[in-house]
Image: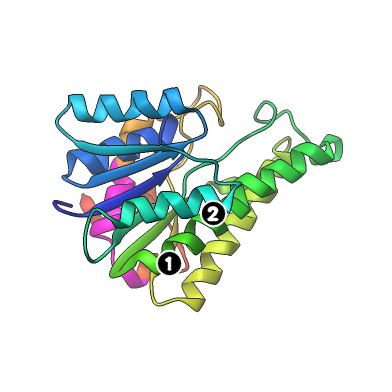
Amino acid sequence: MNGETAVVTGGTEGIGRAVAREFADAGASVVLCARDADRVADAVDAIEADGGTATGIRADVRDEFDVERLMETAARFRDDGIDHVVANAGVYHGDPGETPLSGESYAAFDDHLRTNARGVFASVSEALPHLNDGARVLVPTGSVARDAEPGTGSYAVSKAAAEAVARGFAADTPHAVGCVDPGLVATDLSGSGGRDPADVAPIFRWAATDAPAAELDGSVLGLREWRSATR
């Protein structure tokens, strides 16, 4: 990834922070964002302390003008634009497994969709004018997007919508747009169970660089595909 530019939304914690670090360690210039400016600065400092290159912007993916500014900033790193986008920013209102759809508030439903699905739409839409010919867009996902599980409520609905957004862009643009399912990961969104985010970040690096573009485009790549390709 030497000399390449990568954008990671929600890049200050969990999967996003781990992926931003992974990409920077591989030589990419990383542009990350989140809603909390102090956390953005901390994530950038951590990458730079390890010798990586990073820029941070306080941005909310619910605001397309914030996302537009984010992508314009990233595009300035190279004459031929952005190489990778990881549309990772997301929220979960409530505790995993304890938010049944039948008890969901309208406010939680709306913000899950606005952040987790519309945020992906905004991230890809605003990146499109700046993506180079070989660019790839990755959307983190999970099994709840496809297999109903009790208590995952409108969060699961929003992840299903995010997958649909990725498939739509895959069908309508020349760029490789796909989803990455790293399995259960220990984050603030999913809870303490699961793998460490740093342990799954290499899956995203593989999907961004070595996975066949045709296999990524419009589909979901996960642990099984990564292990099969890298063992």
Q: Residue 203 bears which disc, if any?
A: none
- Give how far across and how far down residue 143 sits, in percent: 56, 47
**Viewer-nearest residue: 44 or 214:** 44
Q: How far is disc 2 from disc 1 in space, using C-alphas?
A: 12 Å
* Above/below status of 103 relative to 203: above
Which residue is found at the position 46% from the left and 41% from the top? 183
- Relative depth, front residue between 151 and 29: 29
Tell whether 130 sits left or right of 172: left
Say whether residue 208 is left or right of residue 88: left
Whole-percent x and y of residue 73?
Answer: 35, 50
What type is the residue that disc 1 sits on? Leu
x, y percent for residue 57: 41, 38
Task: Answer few, some or many: residues within 10 Å of disc 1's Cα (few below 14, many 20 plus, some between 14 and 19).
Answer: some
User: Which residue position holds label 1?
Assistant: 128
Residue drawn where x is 33% and y is 44% of the image: 31
Q: Is residue 145 visible?
A: no
Which residue is labeled 2 in the image?
120
